[in-house]
Image (spheres, helix red, strand yellow):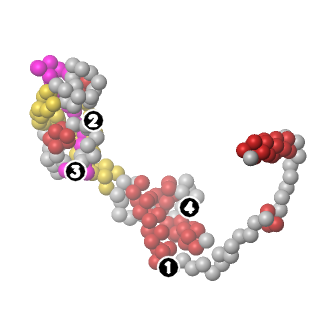
Amino acid sequence: MKRFLTLFLVCVLTVCMLASCGGKRFEYNYDEYLTLGNYKGVEVSVAEIEKEIEAQYDSILASNAKDVETGKPAADGNKVKYTMTAKIDGADVEALTKKDASVTLGTGKTGLDELDKALVGMSVGDSKEVTLTIPADFTGNAEVDGKEAVLTVAVSAVTENVKPTELTDDMIKTATGELYTTIADYEIYLRGAIKE
């Protein structure tokens, strides 16, 4: 049975390959084979339309968010720009030196929990020493990894990502590649697209 099935499939594939190599183009009327459902009369509620439009507007506003200086001590969710030097046994460690590095607090992206915790509460211009043990596989350098280090951290900026509260025509132009130039035009398009 398996041989018969295999032979049958090989024959079908061979016929298909030979037929496709003929160079002739066949045009089919798909209406003979395909029947689409009737979607006329499908209702979309006004609330659903409004919700989708608001979601589109919110997405455009989010894409126009800017980092703004907080003027306050750093907190989770803030982006902190900092410079860091490190010493192990009194010797400077280049592998841990950072100049104008940035991290969003609370994300754990520094890889050093103690550093993240130390940055919380610091303000622009603050400097702090942090003593910690570098994780075993942090840098790939055996002279650094797993050792106790003293980090000196200085904060140069504390910002938060602020989303605009009002949509503008310029935002619509940018978001749509100037396909729509006003909020009103874009809303007309959205209402039509959602109803379809």
Q: Disc 4 vs disc 2: which is toward the camera?
A: 2
Q: Is residue 95 left or right of residue 35?
A: left
Residue 101: which disc? 2
Q: CA distance from mark 2 to mark 3?
A: 17 Å
Q: Is residue 175 visible?
A: yes
The answer for how far apart the CA atoms under marks 3 and 4 are is: 38 Å
Please tell me whether mark 2 or mark 3 is closer to you in this view.
3
Which residues fall within the magenta stretch? Answer: 75-93
Q: CA distance from mark 4 to mark 2?
A: 38 Å
Q: Amino acid at mark 4?
A: Tyr
SS category of the residue bearing label 3: loop
Q: Position of residue 57 (x, y in %)?
A: 44, 64
Sequence-wise, the earlier of marks 3 and 4 is 3
Residue at x 22% of width, y 50% of height: 76
Residue shown at the point (51%, 79%) measured from the top left:
45
Q: Specify the amino acid type for callout 3.
A: Asp
Going by the numbered disc 1, the residue's amino acid type is: Val
Between 36 and 100, the one nearer to me in the picture: 36
Quickly name the residue at label 3.
76
* Residue topped by disc 1: 46
* Rendered image: mark on residue 180: 4
Instruction: Measure the C-alpha gap from mark 3 to mark 1.
Output: 38 Å
Q: Can you say whether 110 is above or below 177 in the image?
A: above
Look at the numbered discs 2 and 3 and tell me whether their residues touch, using CB distance below 8 Å.
no
Residue 163 is situated, as x and y percent measured from the top left of the image, at 34, 58
Q: Secondary structure at mark 2?
A: strand
- Are there few (<14), some (14-19), or many (20+) residues within 10 Å of tag 2? some
Asked if 121 appears above or below 86 in the picture, the reply is below
Q: For residue 136: magenta?
A: no
Q: Sequence-wise, which precedes: disc 2 or disc 1?
A: 1
Left or right, 76 with respect to 131, comes to right
